[in-house]
Amino acid sequence: MITRNTSMRRLDFEVKKAKINWDKDQERKQSEKAYQTKMQTLHERMDEGYKKYSDFEDVALNPTVPISPMIVEILSESENPADVAYYLGPQQSRSD
């Protein structure tokens, strides 16, 4: 026989578990939103490279040049990400 006390403890446990899961989900959503905002801002700032360099896409966004998550992070925090990407493009290909 399940006592009222046991039922209350079980209910309390389930509520706490649900709250923990909800908090984790909210934190994940906030992180995703912050990342999406950061990437959108980076893309907008990278567009400046098309205005500045006629060969920007060929040099900075060359698909054969690997761009690691660390480089994306550096670019997103840079004052001039288009200039940095343009500089790194040929540097990456020379390191092969």
Image (tube, rainbow, N blue to C red):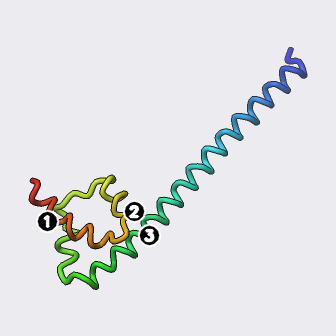
Total labels drawn: 3
Pointer 3 local density, CA inside 10 Å: few below 14, some 14–19, many at least 20: few
| Labels 1 and 3: the sequence-earlier one | 3
Q: Position of residue 5 (x, y in %)?
A: 88, 21
Q: Quadrant of residue 65?
A: bottom left
Residue 70, numbered label: none
| Labels 2 and 1: the sequence-earlier one | 2
| Labels 2 and 3: the sequence-earlier one | 3
Residue linked to disc 3:
40
In this view, the residue in front, 24 or 91, is 91
Tell me which amino acid carries mark 3. Gln
The structure residue drawn at horizontal position 65% and vertical position 45%, both measured from the top left corner, is: 23
In this view, the residue in front, 23 or 10, is 23
Residue farthest toward the front in the current orientation of the protein: 79
Q: Is residue 11 above or below residue 2?
A: below
Q: Position of residue 17 (x, y in %)?
A: 69, 34
Element type where label 2 sits in the image: helix
Asked whether disc 2 touches disc 1, contact meaning CB atoms under 8 Å apart, the reply is no
Residue linked to disc 2:
77
The structure residue drawn at horizontal position 32% and vertical position 53%, both measured from the top left corner, is: 70
